[in-house]
Amino acid sequence: MVNEKDVPENLEWNINVRDGTKQVVAVPELRLVDKACLQLKSVVGGLILKVWRFLVEAWNLGAAEPKKVIHAMKVGLALTIVSLCYYLRSTYEGVGGNAMRAVMTVVVVFESSVGATLYKSINRVAATSLAGSLGLGVHWISYKSGEKFEPIIIGISVFFLASAATFSRFISSVKSRFDYGAVIFILTFTLVSVSGYRVNEISELAFQRLFTIFIGNSFCILVSIFFYPTWAGAELHRLIYQNLEKLADSLDGTSMTMEMWLKTPTTIKNQRVQAKFARWEPAHGGFNFYHPWKQYLKIGASLRSSAYCIEALRGCMDSESQAPGIGYLKKHVSNACKTMNNSSSDILRELAITVKTMTKSSKMGLSVQEMNTAVQKLQISLKSIPSCLIAPTSEETADEAPFRKTCITPLVEVIPLTTFVSLLIENAARINGIVDAVNELAVMVDMKHGSSKKTNTVTTLPQIPKP
């Protein structure tokens, strides 16, 4: 045991000198002030490091996605314009302190896309106007009924209208278009109904608030449309044809990124949200006001269905066994498989060009016909596989023909190959579903023919029979 007396109070260093001697150097003990300075330096250094990492992350995000930087600048511009209006004497005298509600409207309403901004702006103005009018009517009736019946009338009206507005949010048609407006209606109607002002005072106050909300919405819409607009419809359109290209690349084996958009649940949600907001956007680019955005969701669903089948094909290829008779069977179906895979990839690329340029393809009919022909050959090959299970061995010669040696392939070893061929046929049927969905879009938007002289259009061929 070491006694406490033997332990030195200060830290000591033993230093070996070149002449072989040792020197003991005592390290002076740090004072309380020095310890505090070191602690402060470590805290400040860590804080600076975190700030630097945050700035680097923000810079990388802005460089990778400039649209987010533009959106931030658009919000700042709209807030600046609305804030300057607050300092105009005529505006301030007209609406008083309610002018700050225009600033609140910009913060709440402004979204990254034009469609989302229009959706919130229109819903907010319409819901505020309707709820304010009903609230004023209920408040006037309760005021005229006397103090005894006033709380009863207000309570009953708030209960029924708030309950009805809340229940309407569960209706699909209302939820997809007016969900935000229903929330604003409940909030505005309740506030106006239970207000303690007299009728004439609350009418003036409601008008001022509605006017300031209208000012904020107007600047939001103008800035969103005329300053580097981001259209939800164009984003959805770009997403669909890019997914078609990715699917074609995955069939060619040149892309392994399909899982990123296939297995992410936000992909379906993003498409639905973009289609929802695109319906609120005015005509822009090659899209009119009544563009069939719902059809893009149908194309996206068909794409995911084909992508799942391709994922299963990859798993089947990875687990395929190598048996003596499998090589012979592979040669039996290889040409038809290659033909169908190439034609399927060509179809998806033509569909991507069709959606991207909004023009009909002149090569689609031929590509679909080639794929269907390959499918029919594969179906015949599948039916003939039982007769090919007895495959000739490598030792067979012409002189031994009457006494031919054979190798019987076990059925278990053939199952991966038949599964692979069946999945190829199933994927061809799902690609036909994508063709049908694009056909419907072409009819809805009245697509014109491309620059090619051929007049073959994107035709819907009969569905491929299942094996």
Image (tube, rainbow, N blue to C red):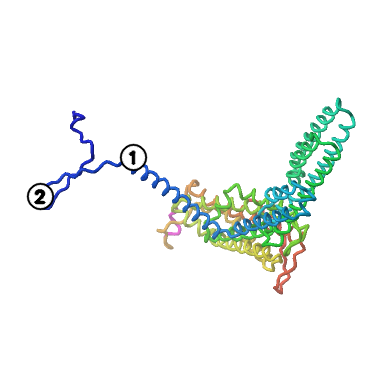
In the foreground, 306 or 203: 203
Q: Which residue is mark 1?
A: 32
Task: Tell whether 365 sits left or right of 329.
Answer: right
- Is 188 magenta? The answer is no
Q: Determine whether, in the image, residue 95 is placed left or right of residue 396.
A: right
Picture quarter containing residue 373?
Answer: bottom right
**Is residue 404 inside the magenta stretch?**
yes
Q: Which residue is mark 2?
A: 20
**Outermost residue toward the top?**
148
Q: In the image shown, does 287 or 150 lie closer to the viewer?
A: 150
Span highlighted in magenta in the image: 400-406
Query: Is label 2 or label 1 in front?
Result: 1
Q: Amino acid at mark 1?
A: Leu
The image quadrant of residue 367 is bottom right
- Up-down: is 3 above or below 60? above
Count of numbered circles in the view: 2
Q: Few, some or many C-alpha atoms within 10 Å of disc 2 (few <14, some 14-19, many ≥20)?
A: few
Residue at the (43%, 48%) spot, across then down = 44
Q: Position of residue 406 (x, y in %)?
A: 45, 53
